[in-house]
Amino acid sequence: MEFTLRIHGGTGSPTIACSGPLTAATSAKLDEAIRLCLEKPTSHLLLDCRHMTSLDFEGIASLLRGLQACRERGVRL
């Protein structure tokens, strides 16, 4: 299964919906999506992982990088 992302929602509280495996091969996509969402003023960022099928060590690291980036900007993840 392919890893896909959809970013939706207005400014202030975007949502990143993930589906498929979040692995070393796909984690850069999530890193980039989080970076794009944090370029605009926002108070919240929601990660919808309901359709994520698997997660490896690098996928977990990507989630932690996203959490750190949000914390540095005062954004609730």
Image: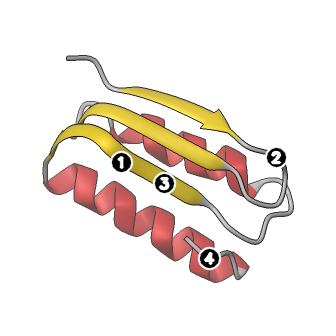
In the structure shown, which secondary structural element does the residue marked by tag 4 occupy? loop
Please identify the quadrant where the C terminus is shown: bottom right
Assign a secondary structure to mark 1. strand
**Disc 3 designates what residue?**
47
- Percent from the top left, x then y, of residue 59? 25, 50
Q: Amino acid at mark 4?
A: Arg
Q: State the residue position of label 4.
A: 76
Front position in the image: 29 or 54: 54
Question: Callout 1, which amino acid?
Answer: Cys
Q: Residue at x 45, y 34 (%)?
A: 29
Q: Which residue is mark 2?
A: 10
Quick one: label 2 or label 4, which is nearer the N terminus?
A: 2
Q: Secondary structure at mark 3?
A: strand
Assess whether mark 1 and mark 2 are in contact (beta carbons under 8 angstroms).
Answer: no
Q: Is residue 11 left or right of residue 20?
A: right
Residue at 48%, 30% (x, y): give it. 5
